[in-house]
Image (cartoon, helix red, strand yellow):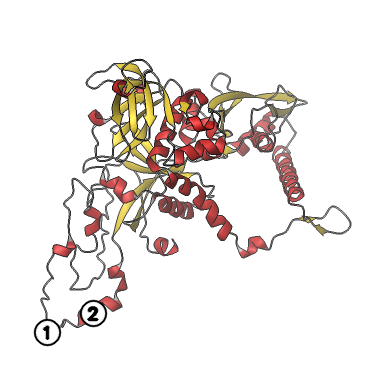
Amino acid sequence: MSAMSDSLDETHTSGSLGEKAAIFRGARGSGNVVEPAFIPLRSPLQPPNAAVSTLFKGNRKGREVDDTQMGPVPNPFPELLPSTVSLVSECLLPWTKTSATQVIKVYSEDNTSRAVEVPSDITARDICQLFILKTHCIDDHSWTLFEQIPHLGIERTIEDHESVMEVQSGWGMDSHCCLYFRKNYAKYEFFKKPLDFFPEHMVSISSETNGIMNHSQLIQTFLSSSSCPEIHGYLHAKEHGRKSWKKFYFVLRRSGLYFSNKGTSKEPRHLQFIAEFSDSDVYTLLSAKKVYGAPTDHGFCVKASKSNSARDLKLLCADDEQTRTCWVTAMRLFKNGMQLYQNFIQPYQKQKSSPMRSISENSLVAMDFSGHKSRVIENPSEALSVAVEEGLSWRRKSCHRLSSHGSPSASQSSMSNIAIHVAQPWFHSKLSRDEAQKLITQQGLIDGVFLVRDSQSNPRTFVLSLCHTQKIKHFQIVPVEENSELFYSLDDGHTRFTDLLQLVEFYQLNRGVLPCKLKHHCARITL
């Protein structure tokens, strides 16, 4: 990974996907090689296209090049460069033997982009690790590479093991598809809490379990090739050539997706084949109602890997988000099987074998200076509680310094509070209720995903939007004024905080009146 990152030639770009960086030649995403403005030295006997010929393989619109069929390039100056020198040149220039590279553009959460040169065999996980290093992010295993197809209004999670170049090879010459690097907290959450993702009424299990299945058994049935669970239930489907949507009973099996033309019958003569997943992927619809006239906004579709036409999409729509999550997750599992589980456990296996801790970090210890003699705190839980208390104490002192200029008043305290929380990554200022729900849904419907925003109904208050049991709930943060001092509270003044940062820090450690603790903040992204 380090060798790869050292060889990267990085360029920052911005603007729409249709723009081309001035220093690059070629069309983005077309399968053509995007070359830097400078031309590196190469061996005179090396074919000019040999290093990049593999980039065209698998591109249905690009011309496939086979260097095995290309004849040797004649030496125009045999007297200056004899044939034996070619061997020396190959020894002196080992980089001519490296794999082909290509420049790709990746968008981040704030819609800014970065172009990097990467090997042709790079995977989605490699891209995420590269951008974690370059943007100095904390690697909490939730960073994900997304494929977005704007002209179809769809996007999907690119699985960690997938080749990014193979994904791009199916985009076509004139498409404005793009890659996004952002959080997806729910990417592997179904391995931790499968029963939350697969409701009992939607899953049919084998008779061997007698209708009773725990977490591990449920996941094993999806990963095992011998057992075959079924996902079933009603979905809205868009009929081909019509604008109307109709409700059918669908059945998802390892062999593919079917719908019944006679109620809830699962007899073979009543099941109509819709799609299989060996050469297809499942996408979510970004604006199901607006773009496709769906009855709800919980739309998804099945798209063939090599097709970019809206006519080829199998458009579906669920009545609620939990139902859509169940179908999409099951399709991912049926398509990738055990590989998905390997993607899930791989980061944790690397952590156990080689923990990423620096020498300076290992040399730090927790100390207690409260007594006559200092002592090292051996108990990890005690060290954590001391660190939290020290942080809260520092926060209180900071708030006191900010509000102590002049006479203490509610207005001064309010101004200091605004200066504190407005720069926090979980604060989203003027965000509507619908936009907050869309943002949380986009970054993963798992317990503890949250954000704080301004209240639209009351300009003096704030709202905490929190996800719990795949539902988004909104809690009003009410300002409480007492003795010319301003506090914030979620429980009508019983628990008070000097600012929003202190409030969030408290509920990250304590559930309090909330249904769950605050775990994952929603980063700012362009909706």
**How far from the left and from the top, in percent, is residue 279?**
29, 40
Front residue of this view, candidates 31 and 498: 31
- Badge 2: few (under 14), some or many (20 or more) residues near its Cα, within 10 Å? few
Q: Residue 36, how many percent across, how many down?
A: 27, 59
Query: Could you tell me if residue 25 is visible in this image?
Result: no
Residue 472 pos. (x, y %) = 54, 26
Q: Is residue 454 above or below residue 162?
A: above
Residue 366, can we see it? yes
Which of the two discs, 2 and 1, labels the residue nearer the N terminus? Answer: 1
Report whether 36 appears left or right of 444: left
Q: Could you classify mark 1 by the number of other residues whose Cα lies within 10 Å: few (under 14), some (14-19), or many (20 or more)?
A: few
Instruction: Give the residue drawn at x 69%, y 60%.
Output: 364
What residue type is disc 2 on? Answer: Leu
Report the front residue among 257 and 262. Answer: 262
Local SS, label 2: helix
Seen as rendered, the residue at the extreme front is 208
Please name whichever residue, 181 or 73, is drawn nearer the observer in this view of the structure: 73
Q: CA distance from mark 2 to mark 1?
A: 16 Å
Direction from residue 398 to residue 33 in the image, left or right: left
Residue contact at pointers 2 and 1, CB within 8 angstroms = no
The circle drawn on residue 79 is 1
Seen in the picture, residue 359 relative to 414 is either above or below; the reply is: below
Mark 1 lies on a secondary structure that is loop
Which one is nearer the viewer's eye here, 435 or 484? 435
| Disc number placed over residue 527 in the picture, else none | none
Q: Quadrant of the N terminus?
A: bottom left
Position in image of residue 441 (x %, y %): 48, 31
Tell me: residue 248, above or below residue 226.
above
- Residue that carries the numbered disc 2 in the rendered image: 87
- Which quarter of the image is occupied by the C terminus? top left
